[in-house]
Image (cartoon, rainbow, N blue to C red):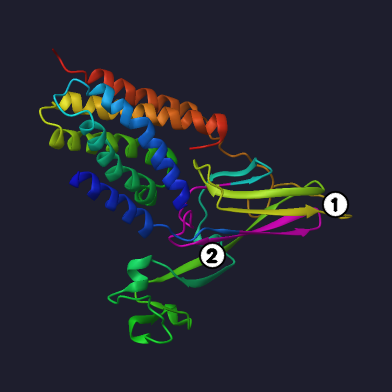
């Protein structure tokens, strides 16, 4: 299970960090800053989604939908706090794109090669 | 950098603290049927409270199924709860034979665990009826996960007994394919998230 989580976490980072860097590329910050904050935000939310959230839901899709939308909310707050002068719309946009892309990539990998 | 380090520490801690025991899966032939025994742990990964998929040779027998403690034919105690329980206030792993003051008797069963570390595990039978002869592999995994924590392979021998695949009894025999894992809701969710991203575009 630990290995499975680690693989999922790395795949998530590999997918999400470039998306975050691209969406927030206009911010007047060093190039490494946005990916670093995005990695921190993912590190905050991913283990909660993977390990803790399944215990609180009986239904699979309730868990997935609430979890993913919750992640967008939390990561947006992290961006707002750590990536000033980013606005709330930009923060939500970055987080939604990150998680939307990584979710679809995970879905694709699961169906194509059995990963995810 | 500090935030990144704290985030790494947090994610590793949550992962290590919640890596519960994996389930076990046993199989035994009974006439033309195969009796599977699932051992699911309280707090397991996946465990008794998880949504599970059970399959034979990749074909679903149970999908997105959650067992009840009432389904169990036997239960026993085991010590769980992660390192925080196993180490307690000490700087070394608690050995209940040496330090019984840090341990408790789980449900008066004579199984001793560090205080707060008593968890139950349940044996749940599932009958896979009318299994064709030959080698088959059964797998048990958490619904939606590709990781297979438990599998068992059995070479099913020809049986003289008549096969009765009525699906009666515990309601879990035969290949019911109750609820297939469709990609459509997932695709819709992914697109919804991208849609949120588009709608949240800043006004210039």
Instruction: Identify the residue at image location x=52%, y=54%.
Output: B67
Q: Quadrant of residue B18?
A: bottom left
Residue to which mark 2 is pinned: B122
Give the magenta range.
Answer: B25-53
Residue at the farthest top position: B204
- Can you say which quadrant of the picture contains the C terminus of chain B? top left
> A46 or A31, which lies in front?
A31
Residue B143 percent coordinates (x, y): 51, 44
Q: Residue at x 25, y 26 (%)?
A: A94
Q: Is residue A8 visible?
A: yes
Dot 2 falls on a residue whose secondary structure is strand
Q: In the drawing, does residue B135 fall left or right of residue A40?
A: right
Q: Earlier in the sequence, mark 2 or mark 1?
A: 2
Residue occupied by mark 1: B162
Residue A46 picture location, percent across and down? 33, 43
- Residue B153: x and y in percent read 71, 53
Q: Please indicate whether residue A116 sits to the left or right of residue B129 in the image.
A: left
């Amino acid at each position: 299970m630990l290995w499975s989580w680690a693989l999922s976490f790395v795949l998530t980072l590999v997918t999400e960090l470039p998306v975050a860097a691209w969406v927030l590329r206009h911010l007047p910050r060093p190039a490494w800053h946005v990916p670093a904050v995005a990695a921190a935000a993912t590190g905050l939310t991913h283990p909660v989604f993977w390990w803790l959230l399944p215990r609180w839901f009986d239904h699979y899709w309730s868990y997935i939908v609430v979890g993913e939308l919750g992640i967008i909310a939390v990561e947006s707050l992290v961006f707002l706090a750590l990536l000033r002068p980013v606005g709330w719309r930009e923060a939500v946009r970055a987080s939604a794109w990150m998680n939307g892309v990584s979710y679809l990539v995970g879905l694709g990998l699961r169906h194509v090669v059995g990963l995810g | 950098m500090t935030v990144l380090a704290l985030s790494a520490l947090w994610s590793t801690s949550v992962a290590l603290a919640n890596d519960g025991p994996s389930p076990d899966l046993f199989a035994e032939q009974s006439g033309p049927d195969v009796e599977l025994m699932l051992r699911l742990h309280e707090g397991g990964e996946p465990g008794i409270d998880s949504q599970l998929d059970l399959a034979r040779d990749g074909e679903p027998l149970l999908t997105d199924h959650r067992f009840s403690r009432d389904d169990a034919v036997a239960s026993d105690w085991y010590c769980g709860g992660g390192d925080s329980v196993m180490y307690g206030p000490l700087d070394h792993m608690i050995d209940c034979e040496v330090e019984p003051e840090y341990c408790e008797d789980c449900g008066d069963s004579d199984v001793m665990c560090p205080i707060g570390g008593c968890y139950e595990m349940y044996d749940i039978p599932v009958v896979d009826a009318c299994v064709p002869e030959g080698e088959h592999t059964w797998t048990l995994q958490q619904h939606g996960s590709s990781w297979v924590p438990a599998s068992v392979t059995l070479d099913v021998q020809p049986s003289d007994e008549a096969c009765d695949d009525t699906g009666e009894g515990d309601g879990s025999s035969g290949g019911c394919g109750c609820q297939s894992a469709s990609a459509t809701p997932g695709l819709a969710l992914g697109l919804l998230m991208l849609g949120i991203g588009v709608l949240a575009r800043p006004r210039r």
